[in-house]
Image: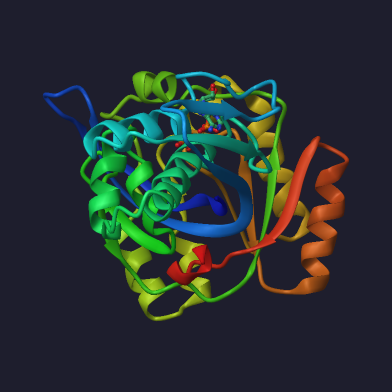
Amino acid sequence: MRILVKAPAKINLALDVLHKRTDGYHEVKMVMTTIDLADRVELELLDTDQIKISSHNRFVPDDNRNLAYQAAVLIKNKYKISKGVSISITKSIPVAAGLAGGSSDAAATLRGLNTLWNLGLSLDELAQIGAEIGSDVSFCVYGGTALATGRGEIIQPIDPPPHCWVVLAKPSIGVSTADVYGQLNLSSIKHPDVDQMVDAIRNQDYQGICKEMGNVLEEVTLKNYPEVAQIKEQMKRFGADAVLMSGSGPTVFGLIQHDSRMQRVYNGLRGFCDQVFAVRLVGERNHLD
Ligand code: ATP
């Protein structure tokens, strides 16, 4: 038996860091939403007691460092499953980009194995397991749009934002999330108003969403990589309604309502970046089906 699971990327419409906790994690408050750019995770039941993983992408580990592999091991041990699985990942989400590609592959693996191994677990249970793998995995189990707090694993769903285009541009650098958090100076950051962002989404207020977009991690990544700031400037110049870096970067995204303007921003950015995408902001939970 073989099943195919979709693993969509996320963007952060707002990302705030409140303080460093005694357990070493940062307390965050962020709004995440799913976009129509996804990896494909294929799971095939094995009768042997083995977990195999392949991705054919030189930036993605084909061993126990892969988050999808870790997800399979965790759920297999927890529920004492004697069967195995072969996991094959076709990447479309850029790696180490601030788009939660690895976390989404892990979440898709949990959802898929729940079906393949007939575990009957709820999404809440899968999200709890996901949190043991990484802070973004819980959100990726549900997809959709949510306010994420704690270290990112406490998820409160919110209505999807109004549909629009998202143009993404990733410069050819990879950013380590841990390094960015490590360099963050909490005493000097300008905090976005995440509650106002949630209100703007609830009110379907597109202009309000554009106005409230903010990410405290930009301060670190833009300083380390001036090309990220340049891409932000280009996107604004070509006419995006609002522009922000996603997660710890380096991917920059622009929200755009009008088709013709989306084309202009997309074509304009392709001259500057190898990896440019124009996708829809979906933001609904059922998009995973
Ligand atoms: P986040 O936004 O959650 O911080 P990210 O988008 O910045 O994540 P990923 O694409 O998840 O970053 O990759 C981060 C690192 O994780 C990579 O350098 C890679 O070595 C490792 N990794 C493990 N599993 C995967 C996977 N399935 N896909 C991509 N990278 C993976």
Q: How is the image coloured?
A: rainbow
Above or below residue 179? Residue 280 is below
Q: Residue at x 65, y 22 (%)?
A: 59
Residue at the location (43% across, 24% down)? 180
Q: Depth check: give the residue in front, 100 or 73.
A: 73
**Please, is residue 43 above or below residue 179 in the view?**
below
| Nearer the observer, 79 or 82 | 82
Q: Is residue 17 visible?
A: no
Q: Residue furthest left?
A: 22
175 sits to left or right of 118 = right
Q: Position of residue 83 (x, y in %)?
A: 39, 36
Position in image of residue 132 (x %, y %): 26, 34
Whether 43 is drawn above or below 58: the answer is: below
Q: Nearer the viewer, residue 143 or 203?
A: 143
Residue at the extreme bottom of the image, as rendered:
203
Please tell me which residue is depicted at 81% across the width and 35% down the height of the picture: 274
Q: Residue furthest front?
A: 47
Number of labelled discs? 0
Q: Is residue 263 rendered to the left or right of residue 256? A: right
Decide: is 17 above or below 268: above
Q: Quadrant of residue 222?
A: top right
Of the pair 5 and 147, the residue shown nearer to us: 5
Q: In which quadrant of the rendered view does residue 182 lie?
A: top left
Residue at image x 43%, y 68%? 285
Q: What x and y, as percent, mark residue 99?
A: 54, 42
Q: Is residue 219 visible?
A: yes
